[in-house]
Image (cartoon, rainbow, N blue to C red):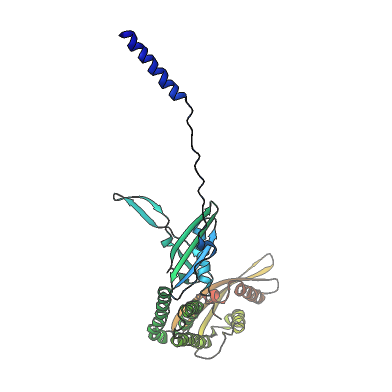
Amino acid sequence: MNSKLLLLTLISISFLSACQNTPQRIEAAEPVAITTPDWVNNPPSDSGNFLYGSGVASNKKEAIQEALVDLSSKLGIHVKAKFQSNTKVTDNGYESFETKSESNINTEVEGLSISQYQVEKIYTASIIEVYALLKTDKTLLYTAYKNELDQSIAKHQSAQAAFKNSGRYERYQKSCQEQLGLPVFNRKLSAAKTLNPEMILRPFQAYENKVNQQFRIAKKRLNFNIQAANQSSKVLSEPLSTALAKAELWNKKSQSLSVKASSSVRFNKTSGFYIGRYVLDLKVYDGNQLIGGKQHSIKGASLQSKAATQTQAVKKFAKLIKKEGLWSVLGLQEVECK
């Protein structure tokens, strides 16, 4: 019995070894054909309710940006996308990482934003070619722009009482800032009109006319006269009078803003040169209110006399005005409206 059992065991082992060494036939997998989505080459047409934008780039984020550019071009504006990634992902109450989300991508262009959109499709053609399709609801985007336009008008109206009670320089600053915002206002208005051709434009055009009118009046009333404390102050401040006149800001009328100029000087002589160290003190008043001012230390030198040092100091002050600008020399906040 033991011999038969041993023989059967040996036969089983040989059979198993033969099975393990037999080559196995592996069937080759059939290649899967990848079909390009139809929207890649034929983006959806715009409808009465929606606008579409498509773009292609080397990655998803840039493809969305290009799609936003395409979308915004239909509103007559040019955009540059600004991307934000601030979505927190938590697991069991603990923050684990941050992830990017296209819902946080906001496109801004010169004060105009396009945030009312959704990512419809993303197609990755290769590792360097990604397509994006966006859609925006025309009603929602129009409503967003219309609300912003209405807020601009409401803000203007609520500020009128304070505007009328402010001084001439402050009025100019306020009207200047409001006028600088008109290009953005008009871009929003143009986009809103594109989205809703039935939009009534009259209130918004009236607002633009009012802003321009207030600025013209404020600019006309913004002028300065110089009140010199003595002859030396008058001579030293002559370059300032010239600069104000060139900027069409000079006026001798009593209602002008007053620049009160006073000066002092110390003399010494070094290596045959007379040195005059002048301090020109400028104070700017709107009525009785001090609104600005600045002290300027100017050195003049001459081989001839102490009096001749003043001529050199005047030339240096003229160069200072040209270098620093009128507003800086007067100690006032710069205003750039024209």
Residue 308 position in % (x across, y down): 67, 76
Camera-nearest residue between 67 and 97 = 67
Please tell me which residue is depicted at 45% across the width and 76% down the height of the picture.
48
Residue 337 left/right relative to 300: left
The answer, for residue 276, to whether it is visible in the render is no
Horizontal and vertical percent position of residue 178: 47, 80
Residue 40 seen in the current view: yes
**Towards the viewer: 273 or 253:** 253
Q: Position of residue 323 (x, y in %)?
A: 61, 71
Residue 207 locus on image (x, y percent): 45, 85
Q: Residue at x 66, y 74 (%)?
A: 312
Q: On screen, 27 above or below 86?
A: above
Furthest-bottom residue in view?
253
Name the residue nearer the viewer: 28 or 160.
28
Residue 1 versus residue 105 in the image, above or below: above
Looking at the image, residue 8 lies above or below residue 204: above
User: Which quadrant of the rendered structure holds the C terminus?
Assistant: bottom right
Q: In the image, 13: left or right of 312? A: left
Can you say which quadrant of the picture contains the N terminus?
top left
